[in-house]
Amino acid sequence: MSAQPRARYIMVGGFLGAGKTTAVARLAQHLTSRELRVGLITNDQGSELVDTAMLRARGFTTEEIPGGCFCCRFNSLMEAAQRLTVATRPDVFIAEPVGSCTDLVATVTYPLRRIYGDDFSIAPLSVLVDPVRARRVLGLEEGGKFSSKVLYIYRKQLEEADIVVINKIDLLDGMRLSSLHKALAAEFPHAEIIEIAARASMNLEGWFEELTGSEQQAREPMEIDYDVYAEGESLLGWLNCTAQLSASEPFDAGEVLSAISARIQQSVQSHGAEIAHLKMTLSPDQRIGGAIATISVVRNDLVPELSLELEDRLQSGQLILNLRAEAAPELLRETVTESLRALPGVEAKLEHMETFRPGRPMPTHRFTTALG
């Protein structure tokens, strides 16, 4: 992939529900407005990703790597970059790893630097946090949170971050935001801390300047216990499905997505489980101009958020649903199946459903220094 100027490689990580896809879309829009070619790479343990559908609906050239995290699919990551290079020759690659993945410096960015250093310049690693979830994890307020081994992954993500990005700052008042900033700075003193609200386009310029103008600095990768990491991932249930929705009378996409979300939330919470991220897209069968409706839920007690809406009612369309929770996959399957069956006046015909727990992470490479 050499013989042309080095492309910029930017990785935007963070736990499930931190708002990575929205932030990546904002960053891609920013770079595109400066006449830079951008290639996006999404990543998940399964297939049929809402993130990919959302980014493509916004007009971005996007490659998808399913079936494992970047660290375990490093060769697939490079093949995706090569396909994008052939298709559009991006000036900047933006990679969004699985939200349950950590140890990205040793297994992704250091291998990139050592093996493909002539092809890429590496931006600092950003790790986004949802501020309400972060306050609960750090003990600043009460509320639903995960078990200790899942939280081990959450904290390890922050430990290896070059930049900790507090996202969705419009959700907190000044005192709660200030105390979160101080707690993060005290526990992760090596990281720069930036405050943004990606969806509201607040405070993005400073972060974008860091990503485009700074190089990731070499330092010792963190120590990590892969047994605890694997156990933490295995506690998370994963569900991906697609379904065809249809009705005799036109229906409102936002109302249907909200109804599905509410039923899933109620069911998961009634079983004492915690949602990490529920996200859905609904695309009309007669789609014009990439129109799509999207909704997201990142905690049990959160009102579902419609981030994209359809202006017109529709009579049929395709639903893509991704659900991640600390719960048994069998519970997720039952919950989603019942929620789709219960839709008033709308028939849901399942086309694809997969449920599983992530397997043990087995990195393709793990380098403890950037060069050598």
Image (spheres, rainbow, N blue to C red):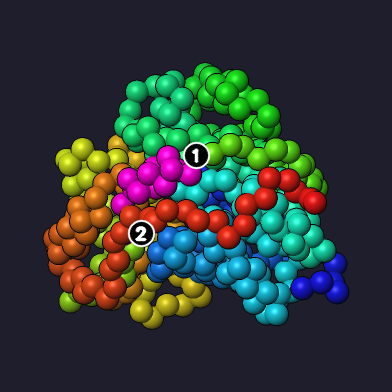
Give the magenta part as a residue range. 226-239
Q: What label does residue 322 carry, if any?
A: 2
Image location of residue 159, percent across then percent down: 58, 34
Magenta-span inclusion, residue 329: no
- Which residue is labeled 1 in the image? 225
- The quarter in which the N terminus is drawn is bottom right
Report the front residue among 53 and 6: 6
Taking the image as drawn, is residue 165 in sight?
no
Q: CA distance from mark 2 to mark 1?
A: 28 Å
Taking the image as drawn, is residue 322 in sight?
yes
Image location of residue 147, percent across then percent down: 34, 34
Residue drawn at (53%, 50%), measured in percent from left and top? Answer: 20
Left/right placement of residue 43 relative to residue 342 reads right
Image location of residue 4, percent across then percent down: 85, 72
Image location of residue 111, percent across then percent down: 69, 56
Q: What label does residue 372 carry, if any?
A: none
